[in-house]
Each structure stands twice: as structure tokens, then as C-alpha cells.
Amino acid sequence: MAKQRKRRRRPAPTAVEAGRPAPGAPPARGPDRRARKEDARRAREAARRRARWTGALRRAAVFALAGALAVAAYLWLTRAPGSGIVGEAALRAAEAAGCGAIETPVRPEEAVGGLHLEPGQPYTYPRHPATSGYHDPSPLPPEPKVYESPVPETRAVHNLEHGYVIVYYRAEGPDALPKAVVDRLASIVRGEDEVLLAPYPLLDDGVALAFTAWNKLWECPAGITPSQAATMLEGWIRAYRNSGSAPEPAA
């Protein structure tokens, strides 16, 4: 019977042969370790970029919301319908300045809208300044707001139909409105929408200033002060700009 040969056992591989660092040896700094560190660095940088982008989006959203609210508030203040009632401060200023009472020149049922002339057609109004009646198909444009010379009255009446407030003043003669008053009114008008200021040569004797809206008229003498005129204009705007008395407010 043949003898079985004893198999020789191979010695276990050393740490170096197994790919592990030998005891006491410094850790390996091969390509894999460097790649892992680079990947981690890139991940941190990407996270920082995402955080910055998210923060920017949030700030932009906040600013956009604030802007939208500001625009809405502005539109509400400038386009809100007039109350139809002039405030006490304006009435007191008018009394102190010697102004007349607020007039409604024609009966409300007679102040109808939509009475169009032919473009450029002349028309003579029964009362000056006109606050209702026939008018040109084209109103005055929104700009300029302050005029240095008289405007076509037939076009101005169309603006009144759309809810505008127009302030007329006497520019020449003994009853002319003082320049200081004109300048104060102009500074207010430039900051408002649907409000115009223009000289008007056909005001009645003794009248230097007239506030108009659709079928509404308020007249004052030349002795009015800048402060009184400003208070009256602000009250007039709140009462009659885009008010229900106009046939086509905010059109």
C-alpha cells in the first residue's frame, strides 16, 4: 500500500503581501484616499452653493412680495374711488380764503356721459369752466400733468368724464393767481395721477382759481394762500377723483 504524501501548508501572507500597511508604518496615501477627499470637498462646495442659491431665492421672493404689496397700496391710494365728500380741513381752508360753496352746475340726471362731438369740432359751453356736456372723442393725455397754456376745453371735459380732477387758474390780470400758489399746486399735481393743472382765461370776474370734477365746481379769489389752496386740492382729490359722479371713472 502506497504511502500518502503529506501536503505542506503554505505560510500565511505577510501584511505587506496582503496589501495592508506593516505594523508601525505610516498610513497609505494612495490615489483612492485622495479621490475620496476630493469627492468630499466637492460635495461640501456643492452644498454651500445650494445654500447660497436657496437663500438668494428666498430673499428675491421676499423683495418681490414687498414690491407687489407696495404697488397694490399705491394703486389703492391713487385709484380708489373718491368719497364724494370734501373733508372738514378743506372746507375750513375754503372759508378762510373766501371761496364760494361747492356747486353742482347742472342737475345730475342732465350730466350724462358719452356725448361726443366730431374730432376737433368747436363747441360753446353755457358755463365756464365746463364740468360736463358734449366733448371731443379724444381726452387730454395723462402727461403732461401741468400745462403752461390753456388746454382745449372739449378735450378736458372728456377727462372729467373719466374721473379726472382739473384745476384751472387765472394766469394774467389783476385777479391772477399768485405764482406761489400756482407753484404749490403744481408740486402736488405732479405727484398725482388723473389730476391736471392749467391756466384758464374765461374764469368769472373775481375768480382766480377753480377746482373742477364731473359736474362739480369750486371757485376761489386771488387772495387764497398756498397752504389753503394745497389743503383744498388734497380734499378735492380725495372727494372727486374717480368718484361715482363721473360716468366713466378710471376709464
Image: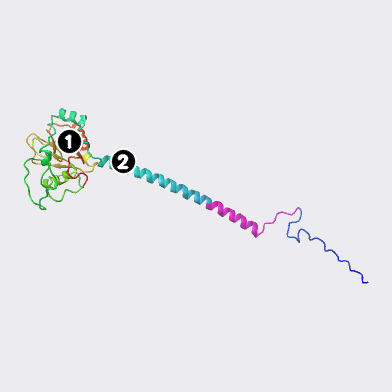
Mark 1, secondary structure of its residue: helix
Image position of 18 (left or right of 45): right
Residue 198: percent from left, percent from top: 15, 42
Nearer to us of marks 2 and 1 is 2
Q: Name the residue rendered at 34%, 45% in the picture.
A: 68
Q: Position of residue 30 (x, y in %)?
A: 67, 59
Q: Circle 2: is it few (<14), some (14-19), or many (20+) Cα within 10 Å?
A: few
Q: Is residue 147 visible?
A: no
- Residue type marked 2: Ala
Name the outermost residue toward the front: 1
Give the vertical position of 242 relative to 89 (above or below).
Answer: below
Sooner in the amino-acid sequence: mark 2 or mark 1? 2
Residues 92 and 144: in front is 92
User: Magenta-highlighted stretch: main secondary structure?
Assistant: helix
Q: Are marks 2 and 1 in contact (CB under 8 Å)?
A: no
Q: Would you say 135 lies left or right of 44 here?
A: left
Measured from the top left, where is residue 203 in percent x and y?
9, 38
Magenta residues, as a range?
Answer: 24-46
Farthest residue to the right: give it.
Answer: 1
Image quadrant in which you'd find residue 235: top left
Residue flagged by tag 1: what amino acid is it? Val
Residue appearing at x 63%, y 57% in the figure: 34
Q: Which residue is mark 2?
A: 73
- The color scheme shown is rainbow
Q: Quadrant of the N terminus?
A: bottom right
The answer to whether residue 26 is magenta is yes
x%, y% of residue 8?
A: 86, 65
In this rendering, the answer to whether 240 lies above or below 26 is above
Give the quadrant of residue 38: bottom right
Circle 1 Cα neighbour tier, 10 Å, few/some/many (<14 / 14–19 / ≥20): many
Q: Name the disc covering residue 181, or none.
A: 1
